[in-house]
């Protein structure tokens, strides 16, 4: 038998397969070499694979593993024990006498780990990223004596949970037409093993034990040693001091992608260092951000974390216990993470309000804190309050903006996009505005809706909701202009299919299905990313996109806030509202730094209908150009972008619109609204 003779499937998923038995053990029985690059490795994975591993070792099989440094204390000790056995006669004798069998592997995973290292059958290296993030990719290759190979990638770690217990999925490559992918994975692994992968530092285990993981022997948890490696950058030091000097209050107005999360947690650690204790409460806008915050909290050394969202029965009792234990001094550190929706509940407010001292609040994307449902909160007495947002002002909600500032204090630290790009915190980008037209039907519908608005403006009894609805319909006509899609697909028709990777397309509501289908029809590997995609599938999709398995992601709003897609190289804006928070955050997602990206490219479809009358042309241009102004001002090709769009504005003498930034236009509209209201008129909000 060989790997080639195995009856393998192209994918294994927990819903239908026992992955550890149907795939791992089956391949191990026929393999003589196993290379694995993985986010997490623990020795208990060996016991799960005991049956296949016994055959593998009987053929003198060898394993190479690359993992991140978050090993369990017991595993570090077992690894150290194995390496010491090579030089220590007494320890060597202890391991020499072990009889390696499936029973032994199952019952004593730690000794098995040490024995494998001592015998030279298992080599482990540790991968550190160079930007304080987590090494998290997951793929592997099996080899047999005849040179056959089976490669796989997917969501599972090399742990008991990843191999057997969790709900996981892996994609398997073993056919002849998969050879290019298999070779690519081999090259990726060898690059890792030889420490030649950009953005990573891969280190031998003995050095790690001596230099990086020595603190484990003192009983501390792995995460705490990792957190000690995160030293604030100069701008983060400034942010820490700014909040501290404002009595631990204030808003961090930092460009998307510049590390607001880590900066706020560094501030909380500074608070902990000064006060000796902390009960940290974190508010996030969406449930899918909770896990991201948990990862970051653990990386910073916070061990005890309670998730407070969903069914109240699932968290209220635990949170009540956490608050009581903290007040009694039983625990000195705790983190409670919740969504804004749950934070508005009576139960959450009543419990958090009972924290006596050393309480610290972080509000991620704090512009959400201005919603009316949260203004009756009981969080005002918390000792430290930090709000995070690239755009803390609320669009057409001055009362909400004022409330946010009164609660958190002013913006005590700003780190704008221009500075972030200059300092290398964000990637440089080129901006390519693409002129789009209305067709006859779109122009007619837009004209009819405009006439309706004019009529409503002059009607003293006009319903503001009706005005808003008409405005919304007009905006949708711009967002869904057919010419935009024609231009988009003409661009991709001319591209070399296999050269396209890490492309992101933002479209209007209701269009994601047809756009995704059209890309697929053109031969691209594409996936939709919207609210219909289940939370447990989203990370798998993003990982596939990061690897390049998925070439194009088509999104509506799910990628607007909190989701990291740093590998994105180019983005296409088919649709966007006039709200700058939306398109500024989208740009920030694209500009996140990544080892394989030197520059990002933004393609923006701007409707300027040549068949419209002068007044309508100016009205539409006034809506579309603030985005151009914001995007073009920091682009490396600013002059060329202005030349490109300026030729469409010059006949109407509207070139000045290229310099009007979103918030400047907002203030002008606001002033116009005030004038209308003073004259008992009505001004719709765009």
Image (cartoon, helix red, strand yellow):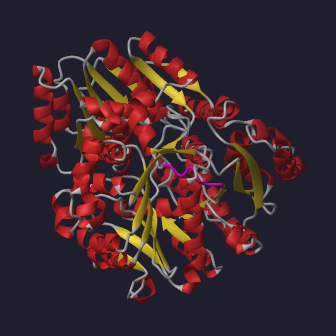
Q: Is residue 155 left or right of residue 509?
A: left
Is residue 399 in view from this perspective? no
Is residue 617 in view from this perspective? yes
Q: Quadrant of residue 609?
A: bottom right
Q: Residue at x 71, y 52 (%)?
A: 601
- Residue 580 position within the rendered picture, expressed as x and y whole percent measured from the top left: 59, 41
Predominant secondary structure in magenta?
A: loop
Residue 680 counted in the magenta span: no
Q: Residue at x 64, y 66 (%)?
A: 445
Q: Nearest the camera: 129 or 614? A: 129
Q: Is residue 662 left or right of residue 387?
A: right
Q: Nearest the camera: 534 or 484? A: 534
- Residue 446 position within the rendered picture, expressed as x and y whole percent measured from the top left: 65, 62
Q: Which segment did they paint magenta?
A: 564-569
- Residue 269 position within the rendered picture, expressed as x and y whole percent measured from the top left: 36, 23
Q: Is residue 502 above or below residue 644?
A: below
- Residue 488 position within the rendered picture, expressed as x and y whole percent measured from the top left: 70, 67
Q: Is residue 580 left or right of residue 436?
A: left
Q: Is residue 505 above or below residue 565?
A: below
Q: Quadrant of residue 552?
A: bottom right
Q: Residue furthest front?
A: 89
Q: Is residue 86 above or below residue 119?
A: above
Specify the quadrant that holds the N terminus: bottom left
Number of marks drawn: 0
Q: Nearest the camera: 608 or 265? A: 265
């Amino acid at each position: 038998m060989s790997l080639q003779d195995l009856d393998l499937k192209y994918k294994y998923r927990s819903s239908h397969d026992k992955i550890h038995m149907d795939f791992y053990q089956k391949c191990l029985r026929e393999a003589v070499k196993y290379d694995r690059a993985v986010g997490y490795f623990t020795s208990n994975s060996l016991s799960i694979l005991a049956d296949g591993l016994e055959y593998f070792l009987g053929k003198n099989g060898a394993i190479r593993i690359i993992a991140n440094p978050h090993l369990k204390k017991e595993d570090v000790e077992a690894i150290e024990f194995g390496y010491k056995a090579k030089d220590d006669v007494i320890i060597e004798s202890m391991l020499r006498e072990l009889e390696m069998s499936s029973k032994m592997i199952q019952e004593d995973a730690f000794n098995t780990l040490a024995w494998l290292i001592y015998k030279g059958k298992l080599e482990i290296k540790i991968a550190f990223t160079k930007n304080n993030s987590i090494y998290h990719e997951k793929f592997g290759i099996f080899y047999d004596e005849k040179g056959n190979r089976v490669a796989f990638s997917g969501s599972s770690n090399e742990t008991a949970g990843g191999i057997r217990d969790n709900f996981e999925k892996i994609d398997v490559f073993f056919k002849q037409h998969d050879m290019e992918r298999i070779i690519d994975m081999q090259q990726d692994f060898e690059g890792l093993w030889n420490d030649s992968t950009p953005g990573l530092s891969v280190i031998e285990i003995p050095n790690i034990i001596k230099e990086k993981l020595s603190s484990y022997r003192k009983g501390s948890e792995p995460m705490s040693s990792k957190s000690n490696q995160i030293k604030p950058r100069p701008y983060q030091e400034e942010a820490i001091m700014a909040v501290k000097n404002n009595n631990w209050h204030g808003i961090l107005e930092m460009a998307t992608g510049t590390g607001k999360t880590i900066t706020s947690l560094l501030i909380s650690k500074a608070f902990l260092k000064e006060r000796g204790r902390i009960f940290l409460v974190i508010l996030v806008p969406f449930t899918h951000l909770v896990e991201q915050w948990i990862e970051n909290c653990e990386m910073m050394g916070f061990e005890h974390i309670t998730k407070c969202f969903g069914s109240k029965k699932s968290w209220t009792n635990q949170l009540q216990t956490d608050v009581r234990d903290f007040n009694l001094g039983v625990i000195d550190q705790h983190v409670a993470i919740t969504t804004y929706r749950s934070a508005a509940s009576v139960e959450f407010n009543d419990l958090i309000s009972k924290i006596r001292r050393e309480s610290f609040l972080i509000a991620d994307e704090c512009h959400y804190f201005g919603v009316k449902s949260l203004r009756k909160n009981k969080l005002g007495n918390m000792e430290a309050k930090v709000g995070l947002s690239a755009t803390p002002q609320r669009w057409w909600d001055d009362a909400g903006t004022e409330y946010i500032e009164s609660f958190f204090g002013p913006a005590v630290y700003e780190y704008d996009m221009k500075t972030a790009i200059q300092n290398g915190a964000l990637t440089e980008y080129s901006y390519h505005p693409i002129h789009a037209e209305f067709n006859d039907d779109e122009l007619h519908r837009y004209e009819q809706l405009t006439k309706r608005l004019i009529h409503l403006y002059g009607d003293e009894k006009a319903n503001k909701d009706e005005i808003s609805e008409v405005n919304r319909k007009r905006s949708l006509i711009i967002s869904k202009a057919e010419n935009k899609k024609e231009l988009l697909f003409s661009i991709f028709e001319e591209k070399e299919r296999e050269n396209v990777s890490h492309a992101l397309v933002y479209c209007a509501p209701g269009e994601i299905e047809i756009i995704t289908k059209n890309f697929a029809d053109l031969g691209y590997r594409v996936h939709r990313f919207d609210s219909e995609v289940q939370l447990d599938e989203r990370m798998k999709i993003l990982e596939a996109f990061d690897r390049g398995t998925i070439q194009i992601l088509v999104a509506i709003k799910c990628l607007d806030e909190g989701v990291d897609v740093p590998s994105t190289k180019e983005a296409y804006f088919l649709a966007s509202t006039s709200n700058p928070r939306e398109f500024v955050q989208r740009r920030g997602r694209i500009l996140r730094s990544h080892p394989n990206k030197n520059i990002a490219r933004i393609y923006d479809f701007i409707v300027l209908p040549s068949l419209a009358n002068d007044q309508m042309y100016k009205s539409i241009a006034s809506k579309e150009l603030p985005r151009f102004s914001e995007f073009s001002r920091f682009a490396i090709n600013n002059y060329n972008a202005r030349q490109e769009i300026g030729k469409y504005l010059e006949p109407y003498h509207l070139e000045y619109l290229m310099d009007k930034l979103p918030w400047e236009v907002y203030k002008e509209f606001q002033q116009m609204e005030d004038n209308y209201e003073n004259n008992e008129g009505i001004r719709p909000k765009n």
